[in-house]
Image: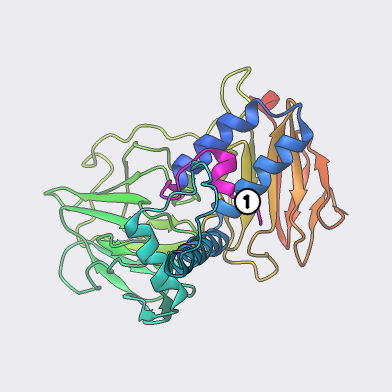
Amino acid sequence: MTQNPYQLLGLPITATDTEIRLRFRDLIASAASDTERFEALKAAFDLLKDPESRRLVDIRLAAEGAAERTAQFTRTQMGASEPPSVPAVAGAIMTAQAAEQANRTMAFQLAPCALCGTPAVIGEGFCTRCGLQSGTKPGPQPGSHSGPVLRLQSGQRYLLSGIATVGRDAADITLADASVSRVHATLTIDTAGNVSVTEAGSTNGTLLDGQLLRKGIPVYAKNGSIIQFGAVKGTFELPVVATAGDLPATPEVKPLAVGAAGDRRATLLAKDGRVIPIIDTVFTVGRRPGNLLCITDDQFISGTHAELVWRNGQTFVVDKNSTNGTFVNDQKLGSGSEKVLESGDRIKFGTSTYLFRGPESA
């Protein structure tokens, strides 16, 4: 029987993505010198970090539990003695709610996505087409009015008033794109019609007129300003153009720093100027939602393409058996192989190139 990844990480089956990531980070720090344990923990994390593979794990555990209950019922009906009890382990206990969800998933009951209408398996977690979280509903649809407007590159127009949230799930402005975080940014419109943009700590960042915004710092837009949430671009249309002197003061926003001396965090610099902090011990890269760097505008990127792994004081890039390869300084890595990165190395995932900056660049 395949080992239970929840048991390996010491987590219940109801653990959230954040709980799984934090638990893995804590365990991996003490397992760096134990290769066998390191690989076992990493394999368990790989199974649970991806919504699809985790769904299959939950289905398997539910099926194994159902089979055991059936066998126990059969033994009871036939008067057979019960086998020795097996001690309960963390992760092997499924709540009634989780078991019911797994049973519905196993039955492959279909429900349309509330945003794009694509049929999806209940319990899948996300729509396979647009990435909307299952069970959520899209925010208000675009409309027209005389106030400030956000016009997306796709042609959609959103009226703006008061405070409007931007994100992938049931936000005031719902953007069905995998590069957009569930809670991505906030737009605030004051009584004078000025629009400020506040980054909410998204994975792939928010750019205003090419400037990467810092989390929690509002920056004012102008009429015609270009905004980019992840890979989704748009333009602000402000009916009343305020002069520079009329706008409230905006703090200077500089690119994200890599951290103080001794901080092991590094960054990737994208061609469009985005500075992407490598925020986790295992930093995943790929096209599928759930990756820490989600690349949706490159058809040569695999669902799970590569990882940047912090180990023994160094950053490694690991190819995850991608279809079109991972390159370091134009040298292709072997499928499934890894390479130590040096500050200034150029990394290419598919056809998307990034400049790696190590902590020593701070």
Quadrant hosting residue 182: bottom left
Q: Pinpoint residue 103: horizontal percent, then vertical percent.
A: 41, 70
Q: Is 89 covered by the magenta stretch?
A: no
For numbered disc 1, what is the local secondary structure? helix
With respect to residue 225, does 107 lie above or below? Answer: below
Residue 8 lies in the magenta-colored region:
yes
Q: Residue at x 42, y 47 (%)?
A: 16
Report the amino acid beneath label 1.
Asp
Residue 108 against residue 225 in the figure, above or below: below
Can residue 80 be spotted in the picture? Answer: yes
Q: Position of residue 183 (x, y in %)?
A: 35, 51
Q: Residue furthest top?
A: 261
Q: Which residue is mark 1?
A: 46
Q: Quadrant of the C terminus?
A: top right
Name the residue furthest left.
191
Main secondary-structure element of the magenta-colored stretch: loop
Q: Whole-percent x and y of residue 31?
A: 69, 29
Please give left or right for residue 42 compared with residue 83 in the image. Answer: right
Q: Is residue 274 visible?
A: no
Say if 178 sits above or below 356 in the image.
below
Extent of the magenta region: 1-16
Image point (48%, 34%), residue name: 254
Q: Position of residue 130 (x, y in %)?
A: 44, 72
